[in-house]
Image (spheres, grey):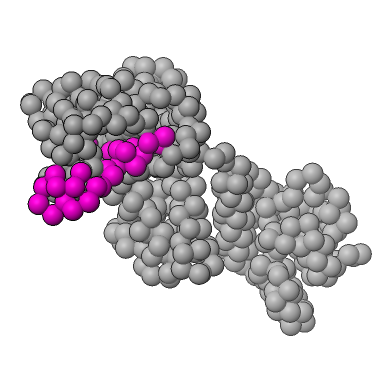
Amino acid sequence: MNTQIYLIEDDIAVRRGCEQALVLAGMALRTFGDAESALAACTPVLPAVVVTDVRLPGISGIDLLERLQKMDRDIPVILMTGHGDVAMAVQAMRAGAYDFIEKPFASERLIDGVRRGLDKRLLLLENRRLREQLSERDGVHIIGQSRAMQEIRRTVAALADTNVDILINGETGAGKEVIARALHQSSGRKGEFVAVNCGALPESVFESEVFGHEPGAFTGAVKRRIGKIEFANEGTLFLDEIESMPLNLQVKLLRVLQERTLERLGSNERIPVNCRVLAATKADLKQLSDQGQFRADLYFRLNVVQIDLPPLRARLEDVPLLMLNLLTQAAQRYNKPVPEWTLADMLRWQQYNWPGNVRELKNVADRFCLGLPDGLPTEAPTDTSLSGRLDAIEAGLIRDALRSAEGNVARTAELLQLPKKTLYDKLSRYGLQPDHFRSASPTPPASS
């Protein structure tokens, strides 16, 4: 992403003074003595911020502003003005200039204005990039550019048009139903996507709701009811929180999976069903089956293919794209414009632990869209310095490598080309625990 600053000033002494201040502040800079040469340098890549004197030989700073706005109206342009040009500069700001600085000015004032303009530009370009990624997505509504989510998208694409039943592992709020819907949407199945939350159905009505019943099957059953499985014929049945399914009904589900037929409650008639079954759990089904709390035969029947959905804290690099998508949805829902966030907002969101996962992120997006406090702890770190941003990026890269190496520190060090001692120091610094990235723990607890 381009971060170059253009400085246009015909007074050599002023230009050199500004150049020295900005270069010492660590900024990438090109200087020009007139607007014509600056405009010629604007192709093929536009600068991130333009600082220009108002009075220049040839094209004036105001004219330069107008021409730059035709190229990209969102380039921050900072005008340097003499005392007599202040009224003109104020008028220019109404026309779209980002800021103006009255001469003479302290170097700190210049640096601060350029930094703010650069932050605004980088945030705007990042938002454009995120919107392009959203618009370029295929029909599979799985958002995220982290390595883990790219792998899940590849898995969904590979398995979507098969009939294989799939078990989706993930914490509450991580987006398991999103994965299930993506599998259905890409499957080409003509039937409905039918979602059942096994944890929300009382055991007394579970069998009737899922398998259906005939008239007279029980007191109050006055007419036939088509169950969820039958309703999902030619489509997809999604069983969320399957660990909550009563044990006595698990064997009945197993029979449906094996024979692709069902019997309504109160009937001996076998009804053929052609539905794909996707199950989701936040628990370790293998451990539950070992403890006798979940049928082992059903676990092994469901466990042909697993998709392990990582928690949001393990893929914080996906937060910007997710937040943009959620804010866009919230704006449509509440008839509001999509709000703009600041760099400090995004850094705070990316440095938060998200115990409630994407569901919690959605709540934050809703509040933010409504102009309310986002509800996150005020002590959440918001280090917007260059070193703070680099730390956040480095921590994300280490998380990705740990996931690829399944928590193996030696292999992670090889992937990152780091000495193991250095890697251990960084793991301690960022509070990353390799155990949380091992395949035996598909849904790890929060880092301490």
Measured from the top left, where is residue 368 in percent x and y?
42, 64
Foreground of the two, 141 or 405: 141
Foreground of the two, 159 or 376: 159
Q: Residue furthest left?
A: 292
Q: Is residue 293 above or below residue 266?
A: above
Q: Quadrant of residue 395?
A: top left
Q: Looking at the rendering, in which quadrant would you find the C terminus? A: top left
Query: Viewed as shown, does residue 38 lie left or right of 140?
Result: right
Foreground of the two, 244 or 34: 244
Q: Which residues are magenta?
A: 214-242
Query: Viewed as shown, does residue 428 lie left or right of 374?
Result: left
Number of marks in the image?
A: 0
Residue visible at 67% across and 52% down? Answer: 48
Residue visible at 51% across and 33% down? Answer: 188
Q: Is residue 349 above or below residue 192?
A: below
User: Can residue 26 be seen from the camera position used here?
Assistant: no
Residue 160 in magenta stretch: no
Q: Quadrant of residue 136?
A: top right
Q: Quadrant of residue 214?
A: top left
Measured from the top left, where is residue 317 in percent x and y?
45, 41
